[in-house]
Amino acid sequence: MMCDPPEHSHCLELFDKLSEYIDGEMDAAERREIEAHIAQCIACFGCLQSLKRTIALCKQAGRQTVPAVFSEKLQTMLQHIQSAD
Amino acid sequence: MTAEPDPNRKNVVDDDTELVQAINAGDTPRFQELVQRYEHKLYTFGRRMCRDEADAEDLVQDTFLNVYRYLKDFRYETKFKNWLYRVAANTAFKKRRRSKFAREPELPLEELAEREELSGPVEVPQWARMPLEQLLNEELLGILRQAIWSLPEKYRIVVILRDIEEFSTEDTAQILNLTPANVKVRLHRARLFLKDKLKGYFGHDV
């Protein structure tokens, strides 16, 4: 199922607001408008779902351990600048 | 002549206030505590901002040096963490300006929308339906990290602060000296760009 041609401009208009919807940064009326649209438009629903998944993956991609060597390097730098004061 | 204190000014008190005040009052050995508190977060920020590991380490090191140098100028008008990331962001921007590759391309929404094929016969892609734990693997995370690095810096920094460091829109706007509306626009475009890269990785029909 997809939007009929007359509604496509509506898809584009809502496409612009999907992140605000996901982040809960919309007022109630705008939320209802998006929810009513995605209930009928599989294209926009698919876009919304894959955008949500992208955000979840970004959080995972952020994981990073500080190498012990670098941590030691920071401590050495710190001792150096403090002794120079 | 000294400036009159602003009677409407409110100090922000957060988990870092006591430590920062102690350091600024002369207990400088406690700066080490501040480094230990934030080295992990700033290292993550550095590694996502910089493709090159040595550049990321320089960024973290220079950020802590700048924080040490300018901590006395911190006025307790914002959360300390926001001020710290502002220093980190400014350090990153200065590094880029020194680079001969200092270009800032745009991500036009029209192009991102065109790639979306909203009018086409589509279904929810499989990669957006599968449980996250089944989808996760190092190759995929590597692809996504590459995609983040390939974002123009002004978009990259917003997606890192919002979706990786999990700052609010308002805090991100304060850190980057942007309006919240501007943060939202950049974040949406960055996410669409990354989504498009993931779609390319998984293939159009999965």
Image (cartoon, helix red, strand yellow):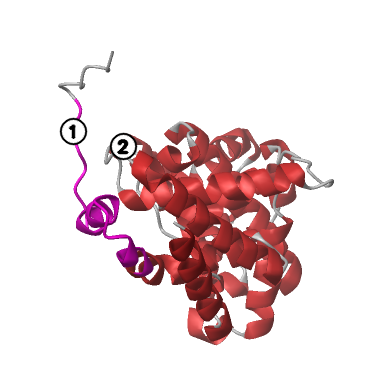
Q: Is residue B65 left or right of residue A43?
A: left
- Percent across and percent down for residue B91 are 58, 48
Q: Is residue B131 left or right of residue B13?
A: right
Task: Check the image and report above or below for B9 versus B74.
Answer: above
- Percent across and percent down for residue B144 are 66, 68
Question: Residue A75 — which label?
Answer: none
Q: Is residue B194 magenta?
A: no
Secondary element at image label 1: loop
Which is more toward the observer, B195 or B44?
Answer: B44
> Is residue B81 visible in the rendered structure shown here?
yes
Q: Which chain carries label 2?
A: A
Which residue is tagged 2? A27
Q: How much space separates mark 2 and mark 1, taking CA atoms?
A: 29 Å
Which is more toward the observer, B1 or B204?
Answer: B1
Task: Check the image and report above or below for A73 versus B22.
Answer: below
Do marks 2 and 1 share a chain? no
Start and end of the magenta stretch? Answer: B9-32
Secondary element at image label 2: loop
Residue drawn where x is 63% and y is 43% of the image: B154
Q: Mark 1 lies on which chain?
A: B
Question: Residue B10 — which label?
Answer: 1
> Is residue A63 visible in the rendered structure shown here?
no
Q: How crowded is mark 1: few (under 14 residues within 10 Å), some or many (20 or more)?
A: few
Which is more toward the observer, B108 or A68?
Answer: A68
Residue drawn where x is 36% and y is 53% of the image: B81
Label 2 or label 1, whichever lies nearer to me, is 1
Residue drawn where x is 57% and y is 77% of the image: A70
